[in-house]
Image: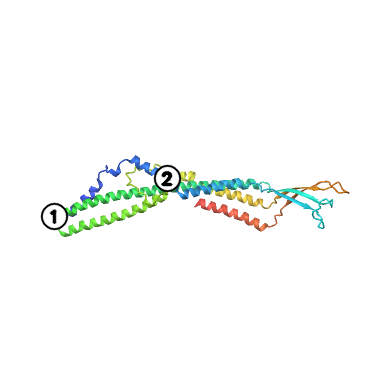
Amino acid sequence: MPVLRILFPVFFFSLLVLDAHHPLWADKGKTQERLEALVVLAMKDNPEVLASEERWRMRVERVRQDGTLDDPMMMVGIQNALIRDPFDLSRENMTSKVLGVSQKLPFYGKRDLMREAAGLEAEAERWVVEERRIELRRMVKETWYRIYFIDRSLETVADTIRLLDSLTRLAESMYGVGKTEQQDVFQAQLERSKMEEMRIGLQQQRRSLAATLNALAYRPADTAIPPIAEVAMTPLMLSAGEIEQLALESRPAIKSLQAQIDKAAVGSRLAEKEFFPDVTVSLEYMQREATMNTPGDDMYTAALSFNLPIQRDRRHGKVAETQAEKRMAIHQLAA
């Protein structure tokens, strides 16, 4: 039997007993610190997280806007002036200088519902930010561990190449003295070429993953990532049922969808309020000049005006829209 056919199993067994004290496998504590530092950097500088936070702040500021009264309207004018003498305001006793103010008041309950809906929308967006942070943390750690796996693979490939070089030299020596066949030399050289090709592919994958990790941390894509030492793996101690329960109780995406369901329910109640009229309160003061025949008593006008909610189709459509929004959020939560 050719000697290399005996040596190859020995070679593969030797890969299983590589020195565990490889220099890259030392100092696990610092390795974990590097990973946590990258996670913190990504949370601090990642543009997508920052954009999500600003979107949430937009919703928070909208809570302050929704439900507030419209600005009051002020009116200044002249009433009952004579056309033939428009600048003489004392010639006609009916001529008045008018100062008025009006305020629109939404139907009872509308403002509270508008604030509640805006608050629930802000809450939903806050949970979106938390979900994005969890996703970013997962992506950073997953990329980190993929690089860690490639580093371990590169070590194994390097050790394999060294052993194959030794086997090739041994095969060449034995072939030179007629102890083995030439095909054994070719086989060792072929295996060495395969390992070299594998190393090149792994190095290319590492460069790509390093660029991805740098992008997640929002730093230059060519920032060097040193070889990752051995990482201590913590076994998962939870059962499948416990994980499911934990997700239902704590997952930000679920809480965001629940807030959207509540917001749609509030929006439906607000849409139903549109079937009732709003009221506008106005008060006018009219100052009149005294004439020869009249004392020029001042006057005032107070009024209430209402919109007429006769466009029923539009209001029914708004109610149907909010109900569809609620059903959509419920189906998303179920999914």
Disc sitting over residue 278 in the figure: none
Disc sitting over residue 41 in the figure: 2
Q: How many other residues sit within 10 Å of disc 2, few (<14), some (14-19) or many (≥20)?
A: some
Residue 244: x and y in percent read 45, 46
Inspect this view and state whether residue 334 appears.
Answer: yes
Residue at 33% across / 49% down in the picture? 149
Q: How many other residues sit within 10 Å of disc 1, few (<14), some (14-19) or many (≥20)?
A: some
Q: Is residue 127 toward the left or the right of residue 219 in the image?
A: right
Front position in the image: 87 or 249: 87
Residue 314: x and y in percent read 65, 57
Q: Is residue 203 toward the left or the right of residue 317 in the image?
A: left
Residue at 38% across / 44% down in the picture? 35
Disc sitting over residue 174 in the figure: 1
Contact (Cβ within 8 Å) of mark 1 with mark 2: no
- The amino acid at mark 2 is Leu
Q: Residue furthest left?
A: 177
Q: According to the image, what is the colour scheme of the structure?
A: rainbow
- The amino acid at mark 1 is Met
Quadrant (top left, top right, bottom left, bottom right) of the N terminus: bottom left
Residue 4: x and y in percent read 18, 54
- Earlier residue among tags 1 and 2: 2
Front position in the image: 191 or 67: 67
Residue at 37% across / 41% down in the picture? 33
Disc nearest the viewer among 1 and 2? 2
Front position in the image: 248 or 230: 230
Disc 1 to disc 2, C-alpha distance: 57 Å
Inspect this view and state whether residue 254 appears.
Answer: no
Q: Is residue 317 toward the left or the right of residue 193 in the image?
A: right
Residue 312, compared with residue 71, is above or below; it is: below
Residue 260: x and y in percent read 55, 49
Mark 1 lies on a secondary structure that is helix
